[in-house]
Image: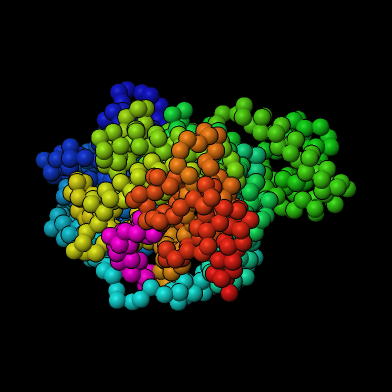
Amino acid sequence: MAKETGSPNRLSRESSPYLLQHQWNPVDWYPWGEEAFARARAEDKPILLSVGYSACHWCHVMERESFEDPAIADLMNRHFVSVKVDREERPDVDAIYMDAVQSMTGHGGWPMTVFLTPEGHPFYGGTYFPPQDRHGLPGFPRLLESVADFYREHRGQTEDMGRRMVDRLREASHLRPAGDLLTPAALATAFQGLRGQFDPAHGGLGRAPKFPQPMTFDFLLRHWRRTGATEALAMVRQTLDAMARGGIYDQLGGGFHRYAVDERWLVPHFEKMLYDQSQLARLYLHAAQATGEPAYRRVVEETLDYVLREMTHPTGGFFSTQDADSEGEEGRFFLWDEAEVRAVLDPEAARAALLYWGLADGPNFEGRNILFRPRDRDEAARALGQSPERLEAVIADARTRLFAVRERRIKPGRDEKVLAGWNGMMLRALAEAAAALDRSDYRQAAERNAAFLLAELRPAGRLLRTWKDGQAKLLGYLEDHAMVADGLLALYEATLDRRWLDASHALADAMLRLFWDPDAEAFFDTGTDHETLVVRPRSLLDSAVPCGTSVAADVLLRLAVLLDEPAYERPALSALRAVLPLMTRYPSGAGRFLSALDFYLGPPVEIALVWPSGPVPARENPAAALAREASHRYLPTRVMAGAPESEAAGVALLAGKVAREGRPTAYVCERYACQAPTTEPAELARQLDERAGRLTP
């Protein structure tokens, strides 16, 4: 972060922590907006667009090397109008110009550096540029001079390049639904493609760098449930085991770092993103339900406990990221050496900890150690001459002591803006975990978050993107509406509190009104009330987070079953048909789409719970014992509704259902045709297990 010298630039008026990091740069930064483009047109200067985010290590590097350098800043100020964008606040701007950079260079990443005409047309771009020529990259000052000269001397060519790039971007967004049928063959083809990418030695897909890809492995788990393919389950288990033992997982504090730079999951990029915690917690939760493996439950709880401890605002919102750097060094907060461990623990515990977390094998990161588990518990116990149970107790105590010492270190920076979409993802994770694990604290956190989102990020009825320090701003995108609706629906199923279903329903209606284009038969990422950009962005593949369209399709299909609403199903199916070729050709970029297709093909497991009307104890829902049978099982195509008999109106799945003998009653249905109702949890369990057995050959 720049030193506070002189006067701050325009970014000092922003709320984004990433933009505020740059407020003391000598660069004459503008935030994205008409003021910057008006100046570029008036002075006939190109735009230098720089996009990054607060937890990005190389963004910090480029700031230190270039944006804090007065000579480089002078070049930027003389030749360009410089615009700084937080990609997490403005995924629309990021998506448009990332597509352009990838088209120009064949790759992308952050920091992203793009040169635009005053009309916003991109004509040159890249990612990180060093201050001097290095590793085949031009030095940033030389690049600035070259681009400025080219713009001045070849103006017509520059404008033509920009127009052609925009035309190419527009053409890419015109994918329309094909006439192909949505069948299980697409799921089988996708599985075969993923099978070919799988790393049989270390789990995960491909080689280094290695990303967790939770949506992909969630699909593989669903594929196992649908087909009985034991290989799909083995791929999931090997990957989850390897990640949980690797340095990508915070062995002391819980939670996952962004990705691993190696193929063994050992050396991470140390930033922690809220969206990774939410998706990986759900994946491990589903694996715990499917396999009964206690280690997976432990990862779920440690990850969610980390979020509640470190990433939660007192009013209920969840922060965005925790930085990779502390005290100017990547990973410093998380690293240990042998002497530090011995200073904290007694000799027996130190010997066990050094072997268990790999320090006994020597340094593994710049002379120090990332904690990981190179050997399983039983192997470590044998090496130490202890029983596995004794080792487990020693390690649990050592973890507590080392964590307490680590808490006294200077912590990485935290981006404390609250993003609607990412909060919707965490809301779903907490709601599902609350129901599946009987954790009332997770349910309370989910309810607090839902209330926060509906009150603070919807101040005038229109969902907004970002909130910080009491101020919400920026119109919400498709992903925000879809992810919050998704989280609210999960909270409804976890609590059977009708207000959350009604809120999800309202957001789904807004989603169709603002983002669905009936002429194009497509969802777009920005609403009809959004500012006009050079291209109206339309994401067609999932990346680190699911794209808005895949989540929209998923949540609309689930709501369509609950509410018997064809107006929800039709656009969802159009969205799936449009990307069907991508699902089979690029399955690792379509995990959430594949899961939505799996739900549609189902058939969905429909569970309706009704109980007598009238006053009920505040302690627990009357149908809680029945709901637990549904929530504890791995039923990925499940939808569940519940209400007192007198309050079932408007929920199609509850229509005509009555409480038998004055007791809470469960109905297990398929396309609204139901088995015999039951008031007994054991009989409900039998019916659900029978359904699950029929879904798996």
Q: Residue furthest front?
A: 661
Q: Nearer the viewer, residue 544 or 687?
A: 687
Q: Is residue 570 magenta?
A: yes
> Residue 305 at what x, y percent from top left?
58, 38
Residue 519 shows in the view: yes
Residue 235 shows in the view: no
Q: Residue at x 58, y 57 (%)?
A: 684
Quarter of the figure that contains the N terminus: top left
Q: Residue at x 59, y 66 (%)?
A: 690
Viewed as shown, does residue 208 lie left or right of 415? Answer: right
Q: Nearer the viewer, residue 355 or 487?
A: 487
Q: Residue at x 28, y 60 (%)?
A: 567
Say how the picture is coloured.
rainbow
> Residue 252 at what x, y percent from top left?
65, 39
Viewed as shown, does residue 559 lie left or right of 442? Answer: left
> Residue 73 at what x, y percent from top left?
30, 36
> Residue 311 at what x, y percent from top left?
50, 35
Q: Which residues are magenta?
A: 555-582
Viewed as shown, does residue 46 lie left or right of 398? Answer: left
Viewed as shown, does residue 467 lie left or right of 591? Answer: left
Please identify the quarter of the rendering in which residue 175 is found: bottom left
Please identify the quarter of the rendering in which residue 379 is found: bottom right
Q: Residue furthest right?
A: 385
Quarter of the figure that contains the C terminus: bottom right
Please identify the quarter of the rendering in which residue 564 is found: bottom left
Characterize the magenta stretch by its predominant secondary structure.
helix
Q: Residue at x 47, y 54 (%)?
A: 608
